[in-house]
Image (cartoon, rainbow, N blue to C red):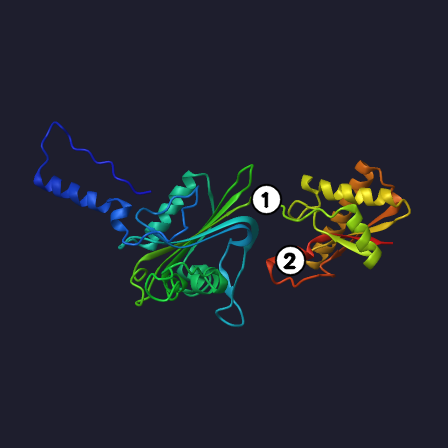
Amino acid sequence: MMSSHLSASSAARPTWPALLIAFSVSVLFISPRAFAQLKDVAGSKDHAAIKRYEGSAILGYDFKKFDEYVVLLGPVKEGRISTDLSPTKGQKVEGQVTRILYVAPESRSPLEVLRNYEQELTKSGFNVLYTCAGKECGTRDAWLGQYYLYEGERKLHNYPPKGGGGPPGQVTEYAFTGAKDQRLMTAKRPAPQGDSYVSVFVATGTSGSHKETNGRTLTLLEVVDTVPMETKMVTVEADAMAKDIAATGHVALYGIYFDHDKADLKPESAPTIAEIAKLLKQDPKLTMYVVGHTDNVGGYEYNMGLSERRAAAVVKELTGKHGIQAARLKAAGAGPLAPVAPNDSDPGRAKNRRVELVKQ
């Protein structure tokens, strides 16, 4: 991001003042390795599309192949408990989530670091969605990081490592506790293969107990690349569907996939649809309700409509491509009304998003 391209003229010998100035500048732009007394924590790395601020070291790192994230598009607000913060405006996205905690060299301000990221991201095709500083972020100066972006399970526990001196993970765990001069920027880069979202949060660490972060600018870089989730569910075969229907009157299917917030079937749904058709052809007298189910994210009316549209899409696929008589199938939507797991976790919500076949 910051670089020096200094060269001396061969036509004139530089004066002592010029040599002193050149020496000062060369110190300012000395290599990152010379700045960083800290080394990157084991297993960490920069995001492939986003450079780090020069001289920074990675203290915390986490990567998930598929997760959800709320991109802030406005300030946060306080709840009944003042530290219970929530977005006034945000966008929920899903995909690969990379979270990196950097510590910058000494004497670098949060503003300088953020401006470098803004410049670099803009050059890389990102569009800034939202920025704020201090109380503009909707709460007290230190709170956005401490009580929202870096709260609870979102804290990183990489440094110090086990055997590295001091309680493992304590430096990164308390990195943003009481941090000052907070600044945030979120940005988006559209791409045919999937959009990318970035959150850059910077603040000055104030923990006198941790020399690694005290007085240094900390950067929490969070990147979401909206790639499709890997399909890990096993296709339920027709014979297994028949056994479940005979035993309980219904069968839940997780091998039917839709575009996000839409009723368009994805191509990877084809094996499960083919097994449903096989089931119906094996028993010509069998008639079924095709019932769509959702999690509880979003409004009630919206989820009820979405679940019915998805069920109707399955019926359309079975009748249009597999020759099943329309009279044998009835689409219905149960929305969030029949959960099979709590909706307060990602795994629970995933189990609730399903299509069920119910014997008429």
Labels in figure, total:
2
Q: Residue furthest bottom?
A: 81
325 or 252: nearer the viewer:
252
Q: Position of residue 186 (x, y in %)?
A: 47, 50
Quadrant placement of the N terminus = top left
Q: Secondary structure at mark 2?
A: helix
* Residue at image point 12% right, 43% down: 20
Q: Amino acid at mark 2?
A: Arg
336 or 249: nearer the viewer:
249
Q: Where 154 sits versus 17, above or below?
A: below
Which disc number belongs to residue 228? 1
Quadrant placement of the C terminus = bottom right
Tell me how far mark 2 sits from mark 1, CA to CA.
17 Å
First-in-chain label (2 vs 1): 1
63 left or right of 172 in image = right
How busy is the neighbourhood of tag 2: few (under 14 within 10 Å), some, or many (20 plus)? many
Q: Position of residue 113 (x, y in %)?
A: 34, 50
Q: Amino acid at mark 1?
A: Pro
Residue labelled with disc 2: 349
Q: Secondary structure at mark 1?
A: loop
* Residue at image point 70% right, 55% down: 294
Q: Position of residue 331 (x, y in %)?
A: 81, 49
215 or 249: nearer the viewer:
249
Which disc number belongs to residue 65? none
* Residue at image point 67% right, 62% down: 341
180 or 160: nearer the viewer:
160
Q: Where 176 sits versus 55, above or below?
A: below
Q: Residue furthest top?
A: 11
